[in-house]
Image (tube, helix red, strand yellow):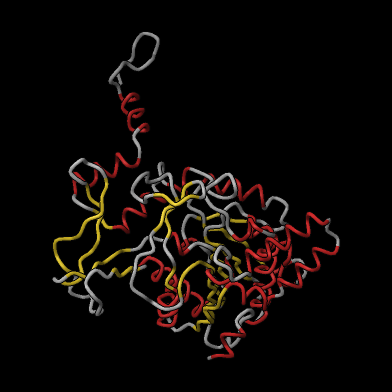
Amino acid sequence: MTDTQDGAPQEGGQENSRGQENSRSLKDDLREIIADEGPISIERFMALALTHPTKGYYTTRNPFGVEGDFVTAPEISQMFGELIGLWAAEMWSQIGAPARVRLVELGPGRGVLMADALRAARAAPEFFQALDVHLVEASDLLAEQQRAALADSGKPVTWHHSLDDIPPGPAIFIANEFFDALPVRHYLKTPKGWRERLVGLDPDGELAFGLSEESEPYIKAQAPDGSILEVGAAAQRLITRIAARIVSENGAALAIDYGYVRTAFGETLQAVKSHVFVDPLEDPGQADLTTHVDFSALARAASAANALVHGPVEQGAFLAELGIFERAEMLKRGASPEQAEQIDSALARLAGDGESEMGALFKVLAVTRRSVKEAPGFASAQAGS
């Protein structure tokens, strides 16, 4: 850097270059990458849009709540996190009540779920005493909010950027609305076979979807031309790693997300900004990108790791079995009429099966060792198996 007499960098110096770099949008970066390297996979596009170190959606903003882009179940009512905490306590007993157990949440949001879960866990003192709490969070911004939310939890908390950093030993993993944000690949059936959908540039230099030149010979699925196959390989790899750890070191995992029970053709990629659906390519890094989770694929991957899969079941049925309706009645006993109405509204959103409610859209799946034949919340699935 060349300095002037007062020490300020001259125009065109290194500091100015850094300023220009920081002023560039992620969209500008993506255009440059594609111009240099050619079209990129949707998987890579999603990964950069969501977790780019300085321009990614989750690494640069607070997306949760009414003022953010979407609302998750823990933000709707304390009942959700409380029941997850009690579920973890019961699972701890089912896996043999180890003297030390890691309670691990993947993508903990603002820390609301874990705060409610730990408060409820105090009702099981031996479980609470055994807990060693770990959060896997890619965003330093959100980690600060989680620290504030958990400051009075009564448990020390350790943060990690990767699942691989979790210490060995028995562990209970919680993943609420986590798998839906993992990147996917798309393949389109054409007369020449399955070709991957890519993100490239149109004649005006704008981001646009296109197709690979070569077909993918390893995809053998039969479908009409025009069908889209959405493959969540990242989610399958992650659940495989979690299942393998559970099998080797003991524990359990709980995945809650919106998705479907049976693998099917069709794309589900969507972008949400300020609670409104937007074009996924319009403003990367400024909108949440998600897909519906293929729970059948998750189950197959976990089973292949020699774990036992419980479910999936609908969220409404899961929460009902855990006692959400009874918990709502308890909360309403000391509530004002306005508070009681809010509790009923939250209950409907979490456990209802209406079009705008989460009870049917969201699914729940658990993973354990094969020796654990029952898991709380899955009696309906186990009865039908």
Q: Residue furthest top?
A: 5
Residue positioned 61% across, 73% down in the render: 316
Please tell me in which quadrant of the rendered image residue 174 appears: bottom right
Residue 19 locus on image (x, y percent): 36, 27
Residue 203 locus on image (x, y percent): 17, 43
In this picture, residue 114 sits left or right of residue 273: right
Residue 303 locus on image (x, y percent): 44, 82
Q: Nearer the viewer, residue 30 or 6?
A: 30
Q: Residue furthest right?
A: 334
Residue positioned 48% across, 50% down in the render: 276
Residue 7 locus on image (x, y percent): 39, 14
Seen in the picture, residue 92 relative to 5 is either above or below; the reply is below
Seen in the picture, residue 86 relative to 118 is either above or below; the reply is below
Please tell me in which quadrant of the rendered image residue 3 appears: top left
Seen in the picture, residue 273 relative to 192 is either above or below; the reply is above
Q: Residue furthest front?
A: 355
